[in-house]
Image: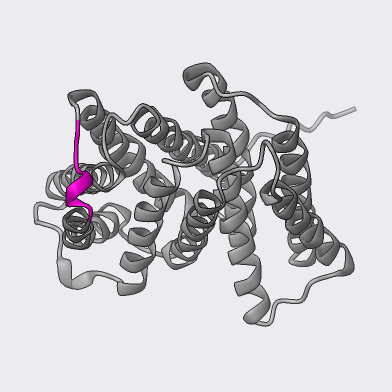
Amino acid sequence: MSRTICLPTLQEDSITSASSRTILLTGVAILCFSANSILCRLALAPDLIDPATFTSVRIVSAAALLSVGVVLKSRHLPRLARANPRSVAAIFLYLVFFSFAYTRLGAGTGALVLIAGVQLTMFCIGLLQGESFSFLSWTGFGVAVAGVLYLLLPGATAPDPLGGALMAMSGAAFGLFTLYARGVGDPEEANAVNMLWCVLPALLVNLAWLADAHASPAGLALGIASGALATGLGYIVWYLALQHLSATHAATVQLSMPAIVALGGVVFLDEPLTTRLLIAAAAMLGGVALVMTQRAGGRR
């Protein structure tokens, strides 16, 4: 009896390698995004720096790192004329609202509201673009919204309403940015240009909050780390991952962020995990995951 030995083809090896690379890039990006929440709270919770200055330091350091990367890779400065105004506006609003929200929210709560804003924005845009939703999708959507409402209901452990609203707007802006980012051919230059265009409006926000401006060396260091590493590096990796992720998968992988941030909040910030937060997280993330599963199933 002859035995046939099946060896992997070059094409199969390439597909496996590409999948592994996408998984790695996505994991690194999610860790960077999660680190932003921890770094921001480490800086703002003890008032080491004001939120406007933190935002400006984050943007300037991210722009500097990304611009150096463009010069090293392409031998030219970032071309500002190639900016996408919608991406610039979305990322700027995300950055500003993010910092101001974290003066009033814990790390885990903030990350949960942020992701809810991201996901619900992407769902609504899909609906407006004519995407059909099954009954289970609408059920998941309703459960996720119920989780948001439960988290924000008045009570002893409810998050600050203004902080929650700011973070929800930050999430909505990042959801738009994620949709605009898909398909960009040069992530390093695209991100560098986005950040460079954000510098001037960030400085204008600084001027508006000049009376409250202050920064310690530790606060500045945390802002630089957030900008250069968690933002600059994170966005390059995220753009690279988005080239091989569907909108559904891009939305789904972000669901891991609140859990990572909440754990970081417990370890680094000594923040408690309240019953309200755990119940809301289960409802929000479970509902969103159900919608994502249905959307992915409908596209096969």
What residue is shown at x 52% (from left), y 35% (from top)? Answer: 106
Q: Nearer the viewer, residue 261 or 244?
A: 261
Q: How is the image coloured?
A: one colour
Please state if 229 lies on the left or on the right of 239 as rendered.
left
Can residue 66 be spotted in the picture? no
- Please name the residue shown 47% across and 42% down the image: 104
Does the magenta run of residues contain 67?
A: no
* Position of 57 relative to 148 (above/below): above
Relative to 274, say whether 93 is above or below.
Answer: below
Residue 62, percent from left and from top: 24, 44
Residue that appears at 59% across and 49% down: 113
Does 212 appear in magenta? yes
Give the magenta range: 209-215
How many labels, in total?
0
Task: Provide residue 273's location: percent of width, then percent of height.
Answer: 66, 26
Q: Position of residue 298 (x, y in %)?
A: 79, 66
